[in-house]
Amino acid sequence: MAQSKALLVLENFIAGKFVPCSSYIDSYNPSTGDVYCRVPDSGKEEVEAAVKAAKAAFPIWSSKSPLERSQILNKLADLIEHDLEAFAEAESKDQGKTITFARTVDIPRAVYNFRFFASSILHHTTECTEMATMGCVHYTSRAPVGVAGLISPWNLPLYLLTWKIAPAIACGNTVVAKPSEMTSVTAWMMCKLLEKAGVPHGVVNIVFGTGPKAGEALVCHPDVLLISFTGSTMTAQRIMEKSAPHCKRLSLELGGKNPAIVFDDADLSQCIPTTLRSSFANQIRSYVKKAQAEGARILCGEGVDSLTLPPGNQKGYFMLPTVIAEVKDESCCMQEEIFGPVTCVVAFDTEEEVIERANNVKYGLAATVWSSNVGRVHRVAQKLQSGLVWTNCWLVRDLNLPFGGMKASGIGREGAKDSYEFFTEVKTITIKH
């Protein structure tokens, strides 16, 4: 662990080694507002080195059997789990979420991502058909694609980074990953475990830095054949533009404006605590001011209640959970994704009305529906333009099933079968006998 003036200094991980960078950017502790970490400000040179390492490692890694790769993924999962508390503390400090959430959700899910894909890679089947009259048998074969570029966001740092790395390397690809420059520490910590887990040098390379420099260099590199990105719709548009000349394969999991629909027959004892957690999970102030300017009413939180912080946290990025009412559907607060503890509450009269209003946004990532009427939840779920619909629950995931959004919330799906198909190339082979 390199340190300078008590600051943690990260290094890129390329070809199995930590490599210093010529320039760095500051990373802040959101609970204090102080710089506590220095992150490499990587660009074309660092990305070039990482892609070269990944390309060199591809022949050996892709030739390993699914069982061999599975065993290595399981070993890496065991090592992260062994250090779960250290990872949770680092994730909490770096991202700003509670230590409890990091300990019970983020890091356990990162562990499970590796274990899940270590198992699923052993159970995929291929297709086969026979044309008896022609004396032919057809079958499909799948092979890894090559070097995958993986770009993950700040809100679920290790959780979503491993959700991309695990299926990519399980399928036999090598990777160059770029975590968010705001939340890079747990990715760096994971790199220290790769060799012990048996991951060959160059299979996993991590390049830290910003989207415009490191991210764009990765997207534009001709030897990076596919890009998996989680982040904003605006950035995804840039990725599509830069990938087009190379006809790259893209998986884009983007923003959302997720409605929570509560009918009058909902079980409020279950609905209210769950909806509170789903509404206030992350941390923004400008939207509250915009809502007030548009005539909305702030029921509680920002601008209404006072927030008292200890002296050491007064420069931190804290904000009271805020509830906004009497807000119009066309308001930016109802149309745009707010990454903060802000929720808008609006009334509706009929099933048809609430479906139309819920669909009246450009996003379509997820939705929740609360009702004790089984027929109603099925009807509403079918009509909502969302890639995921939870009814009478939230964030319950079966990783075998597709995850992804409609409309401006993304392109493609992730999950056991979908990730396998994305990270492999299919070939049809015909044998005449």
Image (cartoon, helix red, strand yellow):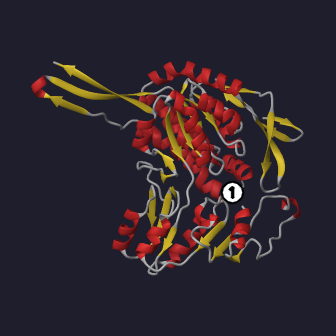
Residue at image point 82% right, 45% down: 36
Residue at image point 43% right, 63% down: 384
Which is more toward the observer, 240 or 37? 240
Instruction: Categorize mark 1 by other alpha carbons within 10 Å: few (<14), some (14-19), many (20+).
Output: many
Residue at image point 67% right, 46% down: 87
Q: Secondary structure at mark 1?
A: loop
- Tell me the quarter of the image containing the N terminus: top right
Q: Quadrant of residue 316?
A: bottom right
Residue 211 horizontal/vertical position (percent): 68, 39
To which residue does mark 1 refer? 97
Q: Is residue 58 left or right of residue 402?
A: right
Which is more toward the observer, 63 or 196? 63
In the depicted structure, whether residue 339 falls above or below residue 145: below
Which is more toward the observer, 192 or 163? 163
Which is more toward the observer, 187 or 264? 264
Would residue 309 be visible to someone looking at this image? yes
Residue 209 horizontal/vertical position (percent): 71, 36
Residue 339 horizontal/vertical position (percent): 65, 58
Residue at image point 52% right, 27% down: 246
